[in-house]
């Protein structure tokens, strides 16, 4: 595995594209027009269409790098681009339905003894 292999795999996971890596990962992304806004917009579009993001990395790239290293590098790149921790809406309080009430009342026989 080389640093270029890892960077290529990370870029593929973030953009779905194979880019020739020239030096730094972030410089390569920026040089190809993939700044934070572009990656975020792409990710939202993929997810809204029911796709998976980060993209699955093709086997020929994935097999050149370790799985743990790839996941850590993708996570690091997401953090560097400030793509982690997007705020989610809060759940609206509501009454429990019948199934939820039944599950709450379902306790093992030894419970309370």
Image (cartoon, rainbow, N blue to C red):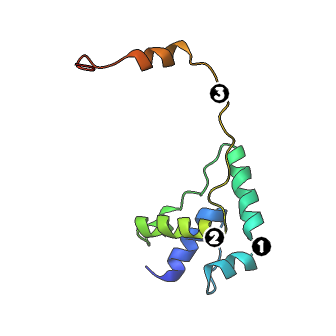
Instruction: Rate crowding at label 1 as few (under 14), some (14 to 19) or many (20 or more) other CA atoms within 10 Å.
Output: few
How many numbered markers are drawn? 3
* Residue position for label 1: 33
Q: How would you rate the neighbour count of disc 3 (Cα within 10 Å): few for under 14, some for 14-19, many for 20 or more?
A: few
Task: Name the mark on residue 3.
Answer: none
Task: Decide: is 88 above or below 84.
Answer: above
Query: Relative to 10, is 37 on the left or the right?
Result: right
The circle drawn on residue 18 is 2
Q: Give the alpha-carbon distance from disc 3 to disc 2, as whole Å.
A: 45 Å
Q: Please tell me in which quadrant of the rendered image residue 40 appears.
A: bottom right
Residue 52, placed above or below residue 57: above
Q: State the residue lying farthest toward the bottom.
A: 23
Image position, residue 106 (x, y; %) = 37, 16
- CA distance separating discs 2 and 1: 13 Å
Q: Position of residue 14 (x, y in %)?
A: 63, 64
Task: Give the residue number, with chain letter if any, for mark 3.
Answer: 93
Quarter the N terminus occupies: bottom left
Circle 2 packing at 10 Å, graded few (<14), some (14-19), many (20+), is some
32 horizontally vs 5: left or right = right
* Residue shown at 56% from the left, 76% from the top: 7
Q: Secondary structure at mark 2?
A: loop
Q: Earlier in the sequence, mark 2 or mark 1?
A: 2
């Amino acid at each position: 595995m080389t640093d270029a292999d890892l960077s290529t795999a990370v870029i593929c996971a973030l953009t779905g594209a194979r880019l020739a890596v020239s030096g730094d990962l972030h410089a390569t992304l920026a040089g190809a027009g993939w700044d934070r806004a572009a990656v975020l917009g792409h990710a939202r579009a993929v997810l809204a269409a029911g796709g998976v993001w980060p993209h699955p990395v093709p086997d020929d790239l994935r097999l050149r790098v370790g799985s743990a290293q790839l996941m850590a590098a993708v996570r690091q790149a997401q953090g560097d681009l400030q793509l982690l921790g997007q705020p989610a809406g809060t759940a609206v309080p509501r009454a429990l339905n019948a199934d939820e009430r039944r599950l709450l009342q379902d306790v093992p026989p030894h419970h309370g003894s």
